[in-house]
Image (tube, helix red, strand yellow):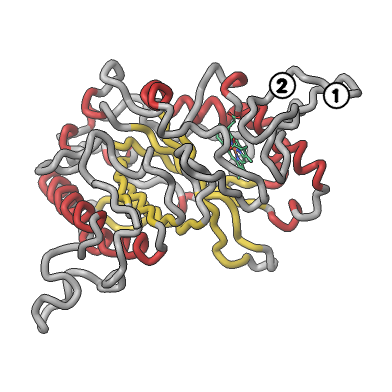
């Protein structure tokens, strides 16, 4: 079982090899919270996250070592479970920097990253406000769902009275590999997902495309990244009636091997010029991989780290299922450019974006500091 350090140059949970399970939570800060209160919350979250990542209880005393006359410090459901590769990653939403009335309660309004704006409206968006946005976020990933849930539960509990859960999402079956050591998993359309993802081992690409650089503004975000979250509902029942050949055309890759339709094996670069017997390109003009590819987007890439979800079914008896898309990038513009280009994507007929959020993810935390300390 893996144990990842919480402290380091970058926050864990980004280039960390994607774990199997996710619990993601977005919070709204309380109207009564002030600067000292926010700093205290981030300090307590940091201490708790550092302990949880090591497989420890949230605080000394824990679930059963404290007073018989007080609620236990730790909720207890992870007792006896290993760290399970738990990583906890914190992010700051646009609303943290000024509330709806524009008030600067935390004294950080002038330090808001200029790029940290709510995402623009995209074609086909069917966003539900209750499962979008948020002032703070926590991404908890682990190889055991109970460990990820335990982390979010205890961190939410610490926030009591200071920040409340706005929405949260459970995920399973990572839909990306983020390391060349991992086999490519599959999404709920049954296709390999993560083949052409940015991998941790591509350090030059990671530096250029994922981490906010010393030359970027603001300086406090150096070593951090921008996180985009999109809850994408998949219309599974319609998809399951699509012929195999058509499914492969929509993606631009084969379903079995995950090879580009222009030929080769999984990791062969797609050849978008290559034509078949009819002179039409083998990878169609509305294929997802063509439209998402860096050559169609001015070189823009991103580190995708999403998860499958199935949240029961809707009132029509259809699975409430899809892909909880998460991507990390040096600038939100990388996501915006690709998502705009995907307006022509043939897959859209089977997709509906229902949730959306963006966060600035501060750089790594040094021991003795709290997450995002450079902002204050
Ligand atoms: C590639 C599926 C949404 C960006 C792929 C691949 C699949 C796939 C099967 C090919 C394998 C791979 O390289 O990972 C899906 C599904 C989606 C979805 C089912 C919705 C539920 C998105 C969104 C974005 C995106 C919203 C970004 C705005 C990309 C990128 C690639 C990719 C950048 C790699 C392209 C390349 O370099 O070849 N996706 N995707 N995808 N997707 Fe998606």
**Residue at 26% over, 72% down:** 79
State if disc 1 and disc 2 touch (CB < 8 Å).
no
Estimate how packed mark 1 is, as few (under 14), some (14 to 19) or many (20 or more) residues with alpha carbons within 10 Å. Answer: few
**Residue at 16% over, 32% down:** 374
Secondary structure beneath label 2:
loop
For the residues marked 2 and 1, what is the alpha-carbon distance in whole angstroms?
11 Å
- The image shows residue 216, relative to residue 100, as above or below, that is above
Residue holding disc 2? 272
**Residue at 13% over, 42% down:** 367
* 333 left or right, relative to 84: right
Residue 78 percent coordinates (x, y) = 30, 69
Q: Would you say residue 98 is visible in this rendering? A: no
Residue holding disc 1? 276
Secondary structure beneath label 1:
loop
- The image shows residue 229, relative to residue 31, as above or below, that is above
Can you say which quadrant of the picture contains the C terminus?
top left
Q: Would you say residue 96 is visible in this rendering? A: yes
């Amino acid at each position: 079982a893996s144990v990842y350090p919480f402290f380091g140059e970058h926050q864990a949970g980004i280039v960390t090899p994607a774990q199997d399970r996710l619990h993601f939570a977005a919070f709204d800060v309380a109207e009564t919270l002030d600067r000292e209160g926010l700093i205290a919350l981030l300090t307590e979250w940091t201490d708790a996250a550092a302990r949880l990542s090591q497989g420890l209880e949230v605080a000394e005393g824990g679930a059963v070592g404290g007073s018989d006359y007080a609620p236990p410090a730790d909720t207890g459901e992870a007792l006896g479970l290993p760290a399970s590769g738990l990583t906890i990653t914190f992010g700051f939403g646009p609303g943290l920097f000024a509330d709806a009335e524009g008030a600067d309660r935390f004294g950080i309004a002038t330090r808001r990253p200029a790029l940290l704006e709510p995402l623009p409206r995209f074609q086909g968006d069917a966003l539900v406000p209750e499962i979008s946005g948020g002032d703070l976020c926590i991404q908890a990933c682990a190889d055991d769902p109970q460990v990820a849930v335990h982390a979010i539960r205890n961190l939410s509990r610490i926030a009591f009275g200071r920040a409340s859960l706005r929405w949260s999402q459970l995920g399973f079956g990572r839909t990306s590999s983020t390391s060349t050591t991992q086999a490519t998993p599959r999404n709920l359309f049954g296709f390999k997902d993560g083949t052409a993802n940015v991998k941790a081992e591509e350090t030059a690409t990671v530096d250029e495309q994922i981490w906010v650089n010393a030359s970027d503004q603001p300086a406090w975000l150096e070593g951090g990244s921008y996180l985009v979250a999109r809850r994408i509902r998949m219309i599974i029942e319609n998809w399951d009636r699509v012929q195999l050949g058509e499914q492969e055309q929509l993606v631009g890759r084969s379903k079995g091997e995950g090879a580009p339709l222009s030929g080769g094996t999984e990791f062969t670069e797609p050849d978008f010029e290559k034509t078949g017997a009819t002179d039409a390109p083998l990878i169609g003009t509305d294929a997802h991989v063509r439209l998402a590819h860096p050559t169609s987007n001015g070189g823009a890439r991103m580190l995708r780290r999403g998860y499958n979800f199935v949240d029961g079914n809707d009132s029509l008896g259809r699975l409430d299922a899809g892909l909880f898309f998460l991507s990390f990038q040096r600038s939100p513009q990388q996501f915006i450019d690709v998502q705009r280009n995907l307006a022509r994507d043939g897959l859209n007929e089977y997709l509906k974006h229902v949730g959306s959020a963006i966060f600035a993810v501060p750089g790594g935390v040094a021991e003795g500091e709290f997450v995002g300390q450079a902002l204050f």
